[in-house]
Image (cartoon, rainbow, N blue to C red):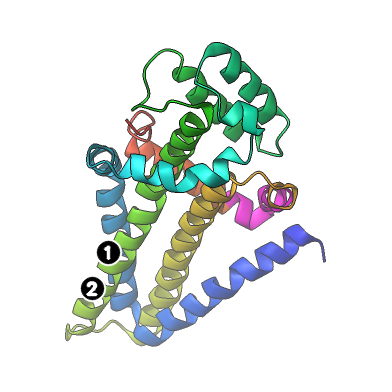
């Protein structure tokens, strides 16, 4: 079995388990959970920009950048990472980033963020290493705001919706009840897995390691997991708005 097919097999396990849970719970609770997840996810995703702006305004972005700085600075030679954020140093940093095992889109985002330090004073980032850490912190915060927080919100709302629906005296005919339970349970699990994969891809893509890049390529080639990840990525950014996904 190829790695891509193995990834798909692993992804299918929780979907099948959720379908079984939907069968046991019944159609109404399973549908309520699916609707609750979609509602919670959409509400939190639509407010991703507001949450990210609040976090940045509260100084948490700079705190995260300081936390990441020791690791991020190791991506660059000491004489480059410790140099003032000036054109010659940023150009050298861009050359170093080009040699790192990063996905092309991530490398471009990091490069664009570094270039912006030549145009504006980026929250007091004095060295190239500090500026790069701030760029990475922005990307981490974007992933958390667009994927992690909506995912958690959807799960919480889904759990509450299932509980409330389970208290209702309404029952559907047994065959329809079981069928809806299976379909709704599987659909909710697929949504959760797709968002979790998109979150993992966004965060793992910031780690410049050959093995990480190789595994992300396997994920992209997976017929099921790859499609779920791309679908979640497109839907999440569309719901948040492409401009809203950028951290101020």
Relative to 47, 2 lies left or right: right
Majority SS type along the magenta span: helix
- Neighbour tally class for label 1: few under 14, some 14-19, many 20 plus, Cα within 10 Å: many
Q: Position of residue 41 (x, y in %)?
A: 32, 54
Q: Position of residue 20 (x, y in %)?
A: 48, 82
Pick whichever, 184 or 119, lies toward us.
Answer: 119
Residue under label 2: 160
Residue under label 1: 36
Q: Secondary structure at mark 2?
A: helix
Relative to 240, 170 lies left or right: left
Q: Are marks 2 and 1 in contact (CB under 8 Å)?
A: yes
**The quarter of the displayed image where residue 91 is located:** top right
Q: Position of residue 44 (x, y in %)?
A: 27, 50
Q: Which tag, 2 or 1, sits closer to the chain's start?
A: 1
**The quarter of the displayed image where residue 237 is located:** top left
Distance of mark 2 from mark 1, alpha carbons?
8 Å
Please check the rendered image and state whether residue 216 is part of the magenta-colored stretch, yes or no. yes
Please check the rendered image and state whether residue 140 is part of the magenta-colored stretch, yes or no. no
- Neighbour tally class for label 2: few under 14, some 14-19, many 20 plus, Cα within 10 Å: some
Looking at this rendering, what residue extends furthest in the right direction? 1
**Residue occupying the point 47% across, 33% down:** 130
**Residue occupying the point 45% across, 45% down:** 140
Quadrant in which the C terminus is drawn: top left
Query: In the image, is residue 204 above or below residue 102?
Result: below
Query: In the image, is residue 28 above or below residue 223?
Result: below
Magenta segment: 214-227
Quadrant in which the N terminus is drawn: bottom right
Relative to 133, 38 lies left or right: left
């Amino acid at each position: 079995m190829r790695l891509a097919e193995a990834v798909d097999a692993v992804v299918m396990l929780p979907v099948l388990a959720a379908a079984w849970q939907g069968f046991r719970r019944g159609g109404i609770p399973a549908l309520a959970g699916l609707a609750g997840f979609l509602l919670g996810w959409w509400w939190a995703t639509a407010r991703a920009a507001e949450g990210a702006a609040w976090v940045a305004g509260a100084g948490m972005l700079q705190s995260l950048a300081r936390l990441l700085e020791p690791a991020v600075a190791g991506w660059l030679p000491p004489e480059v990472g410790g140099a003032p954020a000036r054109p010659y140093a940023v150009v050298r940093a861009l050359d170093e980033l080009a040699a790192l095992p990063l996905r092309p889109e991530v490398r471009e985002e990091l490069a664009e963020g570094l270039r912006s330090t030549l145009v504006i004073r980026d929250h007091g980032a004095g060295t190239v290493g500090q500026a790069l850490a701030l760029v990475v912190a922005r990307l981490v915060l974007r992933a958390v705001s667009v994927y992690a927080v909506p995912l958690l919100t959807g799960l919480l709302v889904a759990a509450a919706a299932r509980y409330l629906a389970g208290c209702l005296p309404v029952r559907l005919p047994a065959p329809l009840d079981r069928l809806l339970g299976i379909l709704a349970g599987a659909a909710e699990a697929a949504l959760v897995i797709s968002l979790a994969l998109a979150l993992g891809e966004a965060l793992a893509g910031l780690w410049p390691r050959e093995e990480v890049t190789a595994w992300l390529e396997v994920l992209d080639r997976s017929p099921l997991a790859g499609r779920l990840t791309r679908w979640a990525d497109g839907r999440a950014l569309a719901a948040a708005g492409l401009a809203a996904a950028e951290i101020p």
